[in-house]
Amino acid sequence: MNTKFKQLIDTFDQKKIDALLITKDVNIRYLTGFAACESWLLVCRKKVFYITDFRYVLEARQGLAGIASVKQYKKSIYAGLFDLVEKGGVKRLGFDENCFTVAQYKVLKKMCSSGVKLCAANNCVEVFRETKDIQEVKHIREALKIHGQAYNMLKKVVRPGLSERDILLKLENFVKAKGAGFSFDTIIASGPNSCYPHAHVTDRKLRRDEPVLIDMGIDLNGYKSDLTRMFFLGRMPQLVRQVNDHVDQSQRRAIAKIKAGVPVADVDRAARSYLAKHRLAKYFGHALGHGVGLDIHEDPRLSQKSPAFLKSGMVITVEPAVYIPEQFGIRIEDMVLVTENGCEILSDNIH
């Protein structure tokens, strides 16, 4: 049984459970290293079971050898689960309420064996996923390497007359050729389209002397990257340059605050208060950033209202922005690794 399982099982007494049901694919992958699909994991105190069907059982037995016992269900995954629960003498079964629809919970409750109590045990794995180990950071660095190569390619080909969709196709072909995928739908927003924080790609053609906002995420080995860069074709109008400089300075102030033990809210305030001094905070309507790992959005959420504190090993985005309606938007986003004494900007060499 690996260290991650042992750490998880150590929380069982506090949560007053005998076993934990894990249904989220990324949590299963985090614990086992195996890319799960339509399968569940039952973590008991002395053994781990992977519950799946005929389609995945052979691959699972190969991929999970020495990690989990693979059990093939025949009637339903619920029946397969409670067969193991009964045989294992589990009396209190933990599950994450956030991973079940109302309809699924009703089935879970209906199929639950008599004498077994269902106990809410939310975010048990996500708490451990907040901080990344050396191997996880390595995966993120590898995703960022492709990210940087893709942006370098764009700098050579982006020109007036190309459409946003043309750029998207070039990115898709480049990233796929590298053996990677995308973390989310790429945002390519030119001119006035850049004032929409999550703009959809259109057929609008790029023009000189206007900004182009490109927000892209790479998915490599299950781990994600997330960066936003501004491209400028020709000369930057004075207002665009001023806003770009202010957004850049607000990000620098936020990053200077990052260190293990610092309240997350303080990092957000550092960026937001700088923008407020320049009467731009009203154009910055979202949180400063978020954690990134196996999911593109993980804890912590960097907002003014967050009660969380930064921990060494967290990988977060820092993405201050200013969106001026019907004119343009500027967003600068980098990925940062929190350390005991400060931080490392993982994307510092991507321009």
Image (cartoon, helix red, strand yellow):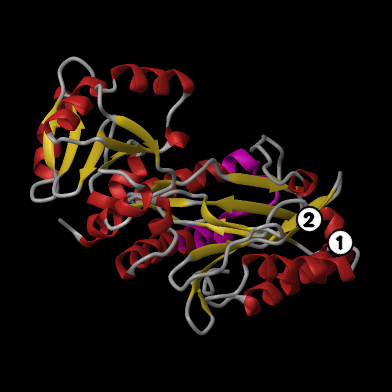
Check disc 2: other Cα within 10 Å, few if <14, some if 14-19, many if 20+. Answer: many
The quadrant in which residue 313 appears is: bottom left
248 sits to left or right of 77: right
Residue extending farthest right:
279
In the image, 275 versus 110, the foreground residue is 110
Name the disc covering residue 121, or none: none
Q: Residue at x 38, y 58 (%)?
A: 128
Q: Is residue 260 above or below residue 216?
A: below
Residue extending farthest front:
115
Q: Which residue is mark 1?
A: 280
Residue 227 in view (yes/no): no
Q: Is residue 112 above or below residue 257?
A: above
Q: Magenta region, mostly helix, strand or loop?
A: helix
Q: Residue at x 28, y 58 (%)?
A: 10
Q: Residue at x 18, y 14 (%)?
A: 75
165 sits to left or right of 295: right
Image location (x, y in percent) of residue 54: 14, 23
Residue extending farthest bottom:
341
- What residue span does the magenta drawing correspond to? 149-166
Q: Is residue 25 above or below residue 53?
A: below
Q: Is residue 296 above or below residue 227?
A: above
Look at the numbered disc 1 and give the secondary structure of its residue.
loop
19 sits to left or right of 186: left
What kind of residue is marked 2?
Answer: Phe
